[in-house]
Amino acid sequence: MQHCGKELRNTLISAARKTAGPSGEEYLSLPLEACKALSLKTGLNRKELEIAALEAEIIPERYQRSMGTLGIDGQLKLLRSSVGILGAGGLGGFVVELLARMGVGRLVIVDSDTFSESNLNRQLYSTENNLGQSKTDQAVERVISVNEAVEAVGHSCRGSADNLTDLFAGCDLAVDCLDNLPSRFALAEACKKMEIIMVHGAIAGFLGQIAVVRPESAVLEALYGSSRESGLERGVETQLGNPAYTPAMLASWQAGETVKILAGLDGVLPDGKMLMIDMQSGESYAVDLF
Amino acid sequence: MEVTVVLFATLMRYHPQGEKNKPITMELPEGATINDLIERLGIGENEAKQAFIRHKSRPFDYKLEEGDRVAIFPPVAGG
């Protein structure tokens, strides 16, 4: 049964409970069990229900610790957002996890690969029990178990210039979690066509780099030269490999930039600015690429 | 002129004294470029991808100045 606005608001208020936050400030909290029960009662899906609660200034308890940085307005923006994630391996697994926990409303995850033993050192969703299984299937399953309000869509295929605009249709932003340059350039091309931002990340050994690529910007060309001209497909990760902590660190930066952009927060990396972080020497650089 | 160079990741093996994490002090002729510096260190073609000086990425034909601190990185593309 669909509830009308006022009736729904009253239902939510009577299910909410006054709670004191860590700073002592009181707020109206909606516990997870109430979200589940009200979703069944009202016929709204979990995302719609959480949006209705936040609009009534009731905070689903699961987001309470995000309020200090996002506020109700920022959380609403995240729940109404859609993000495409290309690559569900080292970076992608952590990015999916973090965005699901933050409550980004829709995640479209694209990867053609299945889990293998060499993924176990770093890829969050690989386990000894799911080797050989689709990375996107595992990611979708995980999102549902972490946050049912998030709509997770998996495509077990290779993202290319031909299909990415269709796969990521409706996405507000795309996150580059790729392990090769031709696919990165294809994603940048698709983002340009869709006029959406691409949050670039790349890792090798202890090194990680991140940049926020605007649709009209030539960040990848500045970083790698023209992929077609140089023939470069991979970087020194082929020699250094990827230990567990580097993708976790870089994916956190990517998720942070993504959240800032979607929620309209300050401090998004400006166009042409790149962060290069080396965990081995302890040095980090914020440089202008052009 | 004197410049300081810091090498990262796979490029650390080109440190002349083998002290991987220590900056290298180099004496170069006036007008020397990043390319000259890379060649002097014996770094192979295409092994270096980015060079940063004073918070900017610089092309490899950039003319170095006295006191420059140059950070040189290989290509990073993994995920």
Image (cartoon, coloured by chain):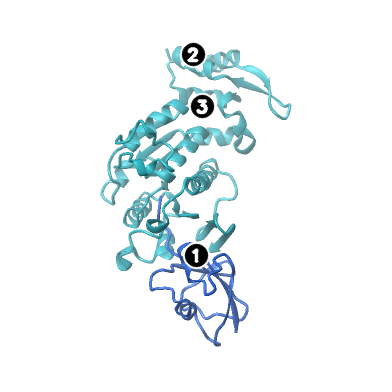
Dot 2 falls on a residue whose secondary structure is: helix
Query: Gap between marks 3 and 1, in whole Å?
Result: 39 Å
Both marks 1 and 2 on one chain = yes
Looking at the image, tell me whether mark 3 or mark 1 is earlier in sequence order: 3
Identify the chain of the residue marked 2, using the numbered disc in the image.
A
Query: Gap between marks 2 and 3, in whole Å?
Result: 15 Å
The outermost residue toward the left is A162
The outermost residue toward the right is A24
Number of callouts in the render? 3
Which of these two is toward me, A90 or A216? A90
Both marks 3 and 1 on one chain = yes
In this rendering, the answer to whether A270 lies above or below A19 is below
> Which residue is located at x 38 percent, y 32 percent?
A140
Identify the chain of the residue marked 3, using the numbered disc in the image.
A
Q: What amino acid is at disc 1?
A: Leu
Write down the colour of chain B: blue
Whether tag 3 and tag 1 are in contact, CB under 8 A, the answer is no
User: Which dot marks residue B34?
Assistant: none
